Image: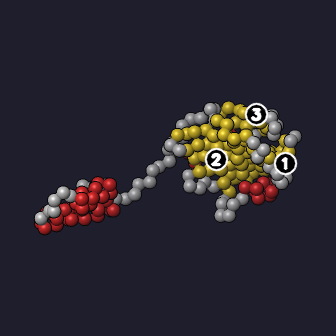
Amino acid sequence: MKISLVFASALVVGSVVGCSKPSPEEQKKQEEKLAAALTSALAMPATPTPPAAATPLTLETKTHDKLGAKISMPQGAKLVSDNAIGTSYSYDLGSLEEIGITLSSALGVTNMKSALQDVAMEGVEFEVKKEVDKTTFQIVKAPQSGQVYAYQFKKLKTGWVKATCNGPVAYKDKIVEACGSLAAK
């Protein structure tokens, strides 16, 4: 019979806080039960929670007048921030998970090399580094800690614009699709 650590802890507390002092025989039996329960609980294999299956998402197009851009994002995404740095949207997936999409100016980006430098971090590998054309670059980082990050750089009339899209790996295809939709308004 497997026993949970919570139950085993309750046994310990119960034996320590008990109202009356047990006889030496009863105390020995309680200690043996507790030792068996703890051994059983510690021997249980840790079963990681598998990632949740992605529920179907419908994308809708939003425009950004200041940057002269449009991008697709999950229908129902909420505006989180709109300031001089950029505009961010969030789509709540529940269970403390979300898909985030941010549009901003890509200062200093003029080619694929500078786009990679813009998103590079020590030890992070790239899954996709694609020059769609001379004015569009797509970068997808290898998933880390169950999250995926995709970037799309696009040269528009207003200058270079960057879309940053992130969320759970289960939604990778939709995240990359959303980021890849960055276009002129």
In the depicted view, which residue is nearer to us: 45 or 162?
162
Residue 9 placed where, x, y %? 30, 58
Q: Residue at x 52, y 40 (%)?
A: 94
Residue 106 placed where, x, y %? 80, 49
- Give the colour scheme shown: secondary structure
Task: Choose mark 1 or mark 2, whichever is in front.
Answer: 2
In the picture, the disc for residue 134 is 1
In the depicted view, which residue is nearer to us: 104 or 21?
21
In whole angstroms, how far apart are the C-alphas of marks 3 and 1? 23 Å
Residue 166 placed where, x, y %? 64, 47
The quadrant of the image that shows the N terminus is bottom left
In whole angstroms, how far apart are the C-alphas of marks 3 and 2? 19 Å
Q: Quadrant of residue 84?
A: top right
Residue picked out by circle 2: 166
Q: Residue at x 62, y 32 (%)?
A: 76
Considering only vertical position in the picture, is 133 above or below 12? Answer: above
Q: Residue at x 68, y 48 (%)?
A: 150
Please tell me how crowded label 1 is: few (under 14), some (14-19), or many (20+) other residues with Cα within 10 Å: few
Which type of secondary structure does the marked residue at label 1 adopt?
Answer: loop
In the visual, does 151 lie left or right of 57?
right
Q: Amino acid at mark 1?
A: Lys
Q: Is residue 70 visible?
A: yes
Q: Amino acid at mark 2?
A: Asn
Q: Quadrant of residue 90?
A: top right
Residue picked out by circle 3: 63
Q: Amino acid at mark 3?
A: Thr
Of the two numbered discs 1 and 2 on the same chain, state the one appearing first in sequence.
1
